[in-house]
Image (cartoon, rainbow, N blue to C red):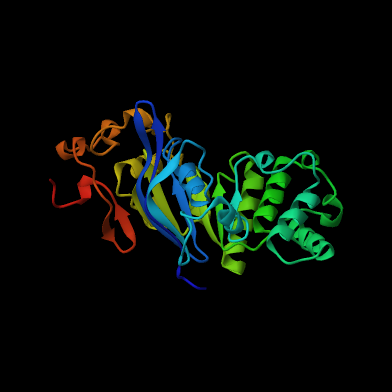
Amino acid sequence: MAMQNLLTVDHLNVEFPTRHGSLHALDDVSFTIRAGEVLGMVGESGAGKSLTGAAIIGLLDPPGRMSKGKIYLREQRIDNLSEAQMRTIRGRQIGAIFQDPLTSLNPLFTVGQQLVETIQAHLPLGAAAARQRAIDLLAATGIPAAAERIEHYPHQFSGGMRQRVVIALALAAEPALIIADEPTTALDVSIQAQIIELLKKLCQEQGTAILLITHDMGVIADIADRVAVMYAGRLIEIGPVEQIIRHPLHPYTAGLMQSIPSIHQLSERLNQIPGSMPRLNAIPSGCAFHPRCKQVLPVCHHHTPTLQTIAPQHQVACWLHQEVHP
């Protein structure tokens, strides 16, 4: 399996201009994803996970905009492309799976019509070949009687089956990278497991890279190779999944791990992180997590830590793990 960097996000900043100044939604976010790798991105709602995915595929909602940074797909910079150029990248080289499949499917067209249109937009196939590929994709994603179901409309599918159709759409042009934003949140546990197995199969058989955006650490533990933890628009820890789960370094990451119920321990109450994610117009100075942190140091109030390598492939932005303080 090739292990070169497929995606490189370099010092990404996203801001929203307002009458009272710019709100910084993403602040200096940098990471890479290798071919065939699953990078799980976790954090509470408002951490900036979905915004990161939207920036990568060029779908930031106005007035949001990239104010700084670069995004490379393989060796091609894609953040400075025109909308027309980005449309050739989106779908063909980067696929997307969103939380609610109904937002990705047009209720007025059959799933077959939508699949065939997507396939022909990106691949040099005639109508008959495109239709056969659509049937094969539906079958590959686990939809029974694909040749018959291809004529059905989205409302004729269950939630889990609709999500499979969306995955088939994302795979239609054999993209090298898939942005999967909460792809299993609205599904029951058994369907979640099937979707996760499908995504794992893609990575193993096709070398597809996946950025998996979720708040579900169980999903991360099951499928991800590495984990990136976000808080208040910043990347605060990134490393191999086993290290992050067993030996989290940032207090926020540790809080996320401790909040997962254990079948091996009886407890009357779930552990939780006190407080809540700060609003964009009220992000604290220094380390944004310091008002909620039980291990806060004086330096945390005024100085923002940067990512430092603590162990092989394991980085954390926390003053507890930096020998030199300002």
Q: Residue at x 70, y 64 (%)?
A: 123
In this rendering, position of residue 1 left or right of residue 69: right
- In percent of width and height, residue 20 lies at 34, 26
In this view, the residue in front, 33 or 61, is 61
Q: Residue furthest top?
A: 20
Q: Residue at x 59, y 46 (%)?
A: 183
- In percent of width and height, residue 124 lies at 73, 67
Q: Residue at x 66, y 46 (%)?
A: 191
Q: Answer whether residue 241 is visible to the viewer in this image.
A: no
In this view, the residue in front, 203 or 272, is 203
> Vertically, is 123 above or below 190?
below
- In percent of width and height, residue 306 lies at 26, 49
Quarter of the image where one finds residue 294: top left
In this view, the residue in front, 179 or 299, is 179
In this view, the residue in front, 73 or 276, is 73
In this rendering, position of residue 249 left or right of residue 70: left
- In percent of width and height, residue 21 lies at 34, 30
Q: Residue at x 46, y 54 (%)?
A: 80
In this rendering, position of residue 202 left or right of residue 9: right
> Vertically, is 70 above or below 4?
above
Q: Answer whether residue 111 is visible to the viewer in this image.
A: yes
In this rendering, position of residue 321 left or right of residue 101: left
Quarter of the picture holding the C terminus: top left
Count numbered badges in the picture: 0
Q: Residue furthest bottom?
A: 1
